[in-house]
Amino acid sequence: MSEFITTKLVQKVSAFYPDLDFMSEEDVENAIIKIINLLPEKFAENLRRVRQKIGCPQKAMASAVDVSFPSYSSWENGAYLPRIDKIKAFNENLHVDIGDLIPDNPYAIIRENKIPVFNRDIFFGVRFEALDRKIRTAVPDEYITVEANKRYDFAIKIPYSEVFGTEITCIPASVVALCNFNEMKKEVNGVDDMTDEERMYFVNGKLSLISITFRDPELRECFFNGQFLNLKSYDKRKITQNFPIKMGMIDQLEDPNSALFLGYETSAKSVGILAVVKRILIDY
């Protein structure tokens, strides 16, 4: 992420777009433009307040972002809005936190929600279809408080090595992954109708909670091209694995061993995709 994306900016934009943590820089820029178009008067008010706070005359502000004085003045009076490159120029040239320019969401209602925190052993042998019932009936180790507009279904305790590999020597006391599994459902008449293959496409490019042959779940970065499910681990002790969509395709891999699990050939059908990891908390 670019330096202009500060903590304050993330907080402001997240009030409008709760999934900001997983947006690209381009998505953030588009979100900024949509917000100031929604609330142009508030943006103008914030721009004027920021300028007065740093003690900068309008002409100097205009010069800093390389526009004419009338153009800048039209931003402060709410007649026009700047392009995203000019907004970013406030940060680059005047060190203004863009978060100070973004209006608060007047429609946001801040609520908190508690989600259960589990150890990974409760997911051993669990199929996705049974996950909802398992989470509702299992006794969690504890609960963790999250914002209600963040779509987390549960948290799972994980080893530090699965997040940062084994090269880090400072091991924190607690690491949890905040997960969502309801997004991976396609309800038809109250029944989940999403196929395993559809779930593989859904988690493509995402960090997910997976279970190989129904063993203890692991965090893996998943990639699916329609033929192979590629599972990348941050734990340096675990190799990147490639599971074909069906048996008999192992000879198409550059490294056939990457398609083996416990010495046996298997397929992507043996990989249970349990949830998408939305956020990692260290020392929570």
Image (cartoon, rainbow, N blue to C red):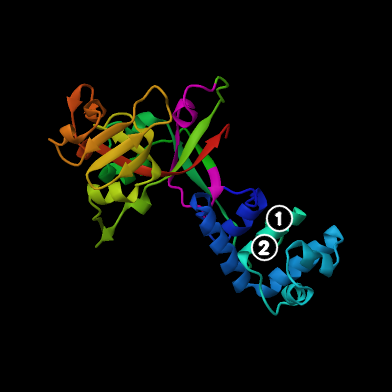
Looking at the image, residue 42 sits to the left or right of residue 275; the answer is right
Residue that label 2 marks: 87
Above or below, comparing residue 132 to residue 93 in the picture: above
Amino acid, disc 1: Asn
- Badge 1 element: helix
Residue that label 1 marks: 91
Mark 1 touching mark 2, by CB under 8 A? yes
- Numbered marks: total: 2
- Badge 2 element: helix
Above or below, comparing residue 37 to residue 9 in the picture: below
Instruction: Give the percent coordinates (x, y) of residue 41.
Output: 70, 75
Instruction: Give the percent coordinates (x, y) of residue 271.
Output: 26, 37
Above or below, comparing residue 65 to residue 252 in the picture: below
Quarter that holds the C terminus:
top right
> Residue 93: in sight, yes or no?
yes
- Does the segment drawn in magenta span residue 254? no
- Return the residue nearer the eye: 264 or 160: 264
Looking at the image, residue 278 sits to the left or right of residue 103; the answer is left
- Does the segment drawn in magenta span residue 158? yes
Instruction: Give the percent coordinates (x, y) of residue 279.
Output: 49, 43
Q: Which image quadrant for residue 44?
A: bottom right
Give me the residue at 79% from left, 73% from top: 69
- Return the residue nearer the eye: 38 or 191: 38
Above or below, comparing residue 146 to residue 160 in the picture: below
Instruction: Give the percent coordinates (x, y) of residue 239.
Output: 34, 26
Give me the residue at 50% from left, 54% from top: 19
How would you rate the neighbour count of disc 2 (Cα within 10 Å): few for under 14, some for 14-19, many for 20 or more? Answer: some
Q: Which image quadrant for residue 228?
A: top left
**Residues rendered magenta in the picture:** 145-168
Amino acid, disc 2: Ile
